[in-house]
Image: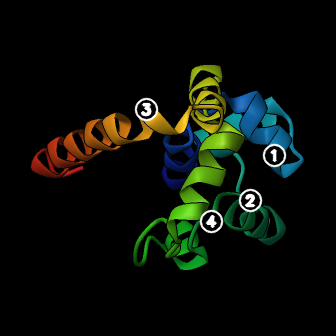
Amino acid sequence: MNERIKQVRKYYNLPMDKFGERIGITKSSVSLLESGKNNPSDQTLKLICREFNVSYDWLRDGVGDMLQQTDEDDDVNRLMLTGSDFAKTVFRTLAKMPPELWAAFEDFVARLKSEQQKDGQ
């Protein structure tokens, strides 16, 4: 379980202190959980699942997929909550982009998505 907790934190690219803040525990508590020195309470497991959209069965027992099924809006919300300042700047810039630039941007995104699919991402 400790490795799966660490995997969730790394998936969201969060340092221990920020991960802990999101679920109401300290950086040192996160460290103890990830090292396996402490076992998480059921409440902590449920908080991780709720906050990070993680499957409880996967987190507790390693069964199934890490993330629960989401839609694309959840991906955008996750990025805005946990993404870098650069990612947030990109979203804010896009929100202000003039209509005449959207066609070129759509082409760029289609090419990027195609490359990611080729790489299996």
Taking the spot 79% from the left edge, 61% from the top edge, the residue there is 44
Which three-letter amino acid code belongs to the residue tagged 3? Leu
The image's mark for residue 101 is 3
Q: Residue placed farthest to the front in the image?
A: 100
Residues at circles 4 and 1 in contact by the CB criterion of under 8 Å: no
Residue to which mark 1 is pinned: 22
Compute the Cα span from label 2 to label 3. Answer: 36 Å
Which three-letter amino acid code belongs to the residue tagged 1? Arg
Query: Colour mode?
Result: rainbow
Residues at circles 1 and 2 in contact by the CB criterion of under 8 Å: yes
Crowding at dot 4, Cα within 10 Å, few <14 / some 14-19 / many 20+, comes out as: some
Taking the spot 56% from the left edge, 67% from the top edge, the residue there is 59
Residues at circles 2 and 4 in contact by the CB criterion of under 8 Å: yes
Asked where in the image residue 108 lies, by quadrant, the reply is: top left
Asked where in the image residue 30 lies, by quadrant, the reply is: top right
Q: Residue placed farthest to the right in the image?
A: 24
Residues at circles 2 and 3 in contact by the CB criterion of under 8 Å: no
Of residues 115 and 60, which is closer to you in this image? 115
Compute the Cα span from label 2 to label 4. Answer: 6 Å
Taking the spot 63% from the left edge, 33% from the top edge, the residue there is 14
Q: What element carries label 3?
A: helix
Q: Is residue 26 above or below residue 116?
A: above
| Between discs 2 and 3, the one toward the N terminus | 2
Residue 32 visible in the displayed image: no
Residue to which mark 2 is pinned: 51
Q: In this view, does 93 lie above or below 11?
A: above
Which three-letter amino acid code belongs to the residue tagged 2? Glu
Compute the Cα span from label 4 to label 3. Answer: 34 Å
Residue to which mark 4 is pinned: 53
Question: How many marks on residues?
Answer: 4
